[in-house]
Each structure stands twice: as structure tokens, then as C-alpha cells.
Amino acid sequence: MNEAYDAIVLGAGAAGLFCAATAGQRGRRVLLLDHADQPGKKILISGGGRCNFTNMHTAPDRYLSQNPHFAKSALSRYTAADFLALVESYGIAWHEKTLGQLFCDESAKQIVAMLLEECAKGGVDLRCGEAIRGVDHADGLYRVAFGDQTVQAPALVIATGGPSIPKMGATGFAYDLARQFGLKVVQPRPALVPLTLPADDTLFRDLSGVSTEVIARCGKAAFREATLFTHRGLSGPAILQVSSYWQRGDTVTTQFLPGREEGWLKAAKRERPKAGLRKVLSEGLPDRLAEALCERLGLEGELGNLSDKALSAAEAKLARWPFVPNGSEGFAKAEVTAGGIDTSGLSSKTMEARKVPGLYVIGEAVDVTGWLGGYNFQWAWASARAAGLAL
């Protein structure tokens, strides 16, 4: 005889833990399964081990999806302030780093411990290290086989995330399940990921380790944060942000020395005609980068000996320096997955599949991808809450 539950949640990451806790505390008998040997493994490595658990500037326009309106309902009903109140109720000290990003003062382990305690309050049956052998649905019940047993419930929650960071055990299992039940999948791709440059950009790849603030743009997306040059290409927060919008063949432009007024090089020429361009650039950029940019611009000598036309052209190039990445570092280095289970088949209020009663999809498995800086955690909490209250 199969052991019976009210709901089975697959995946003990951020979304799965919070959904199970929410449903359990509402009196539901919940089983939470994960093939990993411990819960919350991605939480533990997030934010450099301090977990960037939410962002105070959370808004639907900071998420990518084929349906940009889908996330509005869940995000409006469970906000960053709501999750912060839970964190504070556990006495977890936190700080705002930049741009609304909230981190634990001490350790991401505190967030995992909090979620596990929330699950315990709801009597959640948590089992880790359990590889799932099969899932089927008949007579209004979902049956999940794992180990040497099979369990059943009228509700099943897919919270197994996407394939980003496979070394943590991430797979495309959610998509396989979705297709099994007739749900469409938007082509998954790496997001918040470093971009690689072709060999002809060797000059910049030689700057590995150099970082500077820029405005990075791809299409209509623009982010003012740090860019880091790597031995393979470009990284840093600004690049990770635009990578979510980048498609193969797209140009990424970077504005070096953002905030400078138009004509600043000609003004520098008038004020310091004997100064060299490299000297002027190095006052706002790392020396190695200033040297590389001067080499690419082909401008040597004193500013006073350079024409205004040449300086205007240099300004324009520095304001929209083009890079054409030849790829990304893939799911291995991607912080999250863009794409995923199509929202057209889901209820934005409950996260339940429209045509498959009792089937729910939450978190990263859904085609909703946030910006860098705690937005994806907030989507995990909000979507998990929506499903947990509906179970």
C-alpha cells in the first residue's frame, strides 16, 4: 500500500522548502523529496556564502519571461518586506550591500536553518538523498517512486529548478516532468553568466583580473555596475546582468568612464594640453585598461597635438565600446536559468497547471528569471508562497 500525503514537493531548494513549510503550517501532510544529500545546497553557496536572500527594489519589470505580467500576482502578495520580517523574527542579522541587495551578516546557513525550522513547525516529512525513479498520475493521485517505495498525493509540486550549476546536482528534470504532463517548455539557456570573447579580442583577455565600473548595454537593457575582464572574456555584475538579455550574435556595448559630460576630452585638452591620453584615462580607469584602450584607439602623444575631431571620435568609442561575444561560460557558471516551464500553462495566482489539476510549478523551473541581486530568491519565496497557500 502506498503511503499517502496531501502534497509531495520535489526539490528541497529555496522554493521547495518554503512551499512545503507554508503548506505544512496550514495543516497539510507534506513530503519534501530531494536527490541531493542535504537541503538548500544552492542557498549555502549564494552571495559568497552569505545569501543575498532578497532585494528591496523587487518589481515585476526586473524579471524576464515570455509573459512579463505573469510574476506580478505572486510578487505583489508576498513581498521582500514580508520575507525580511521572517528573517528578523529569527534574529538573523542582515545588511544592505548595494542596490537594495540584502545579505546575512554571518552565513547562508542561517537561512537554511530558518527554512528547516519552518518546515519542522509544519511537520514536513523531509527526505534527502532520494533519487526519483518515476512519477505518474491516475485517478486524481500523483504517485512518486523513489528508493524501494512509492508514495501518493492529490498534489505534486515541481520545485527542482533548472540546469544551472550542474556540479551542485542541478538537472533538467523539471522540464522532463513538465513535458510528461503536457506542459510546454521555453528553451532554457544560461543566465547571469560570464560571456566569452573571440581570439581577436586577445588584448582585452590579457587584462584578466582588471575591473572597472561601466554601463553595459545589450538591446534595451542597460546596467551600471562593475565589469571584470577574465582570461576567457567578460564577467562582473554589469556583464552578468546583460547576459540574461544576450543572444548569440548580439553586440554588448560598454560605456567606460560613465557620467563624464560630452566634450570632456576636449576640455581636458584645453586644461592640460601636455597630458597624454593614457594619463587622462588612467585617472578614471585601471592603468592596464587605460593602456589597452589607448592602443586600440591608436592615439599617442600629448592631447594638445590631437585634433578635436580625433578626441570626439575617441569619446564616442569609449561611450559605446562594442564587444561581440562568441558565447557564454554555459550552465556550469550560470547563476540561474532563463526560460523554463511556459507560464501560459500555469495560474499566476496559484502556480497550478491549468489543464493538470493538482500539479504546481514554482521557482527557477518556471519561465521567470530575475536580475542579479536577490531577485531570483524573492521569486522563489513568492511563487512558493502562492502554491503553498493553494495546496
Image (cartoon, rainbow, N blue to C red):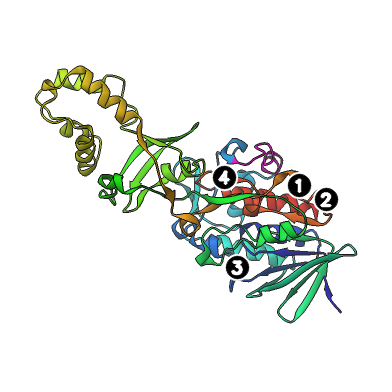
Q: Name the residue under label 3.
A: 39
Instruction: Give the percent coordinates (x, y) of residue 47.
Output: 47, 55
Q: Can residue 84 be seen in this view?
A: no
Q: Residue at x 67, y 57 (%)?
A: 175
Instruction: Give the percent coordinates (x, y) of residue 382.
Output: 67, 48
**First to last magenta residue range:** 64-77
Residue 140 located within the stretch drawn in magenta: no
Q: Are marks 4 and 2 in contact (CB under 8 Å)?
A: no
Mark 1: amino acid: Gly
For marks 3 and 4, give the CA distance.
22 Å
For residue 229, side relative to residue 174 (left or right):
left
* Mark 2 surroundings: few (<14), some (14-19) or many (≥20) residues within 10 A: few
Q: Mark 1 points at which residue?
A: 345
Of the pair 104 and 339, the residue shown nearer to us: 339
Instruction: Give the percent coordinates (x, y) of residue 224.
Output: 41, 36
In the rendered image, which quarter is residue 2 located in?
A: bottom right
Closer mark to the observer between disc 4 and disc 2: 2
Mark 2 or mark 1, earlier in chain: 1
Q: Mark 2 points at which residue?
A: 355
Instruction: Give the percent coordinates (x, y) of residue 95.
Output: 47, 49
Q: Are marks 3 and 1 in contact (CB under 8 Å)?
A: no
Q: Is residue 79 visible?
A: yes
Q: Name the residue under label 4.
A: 370
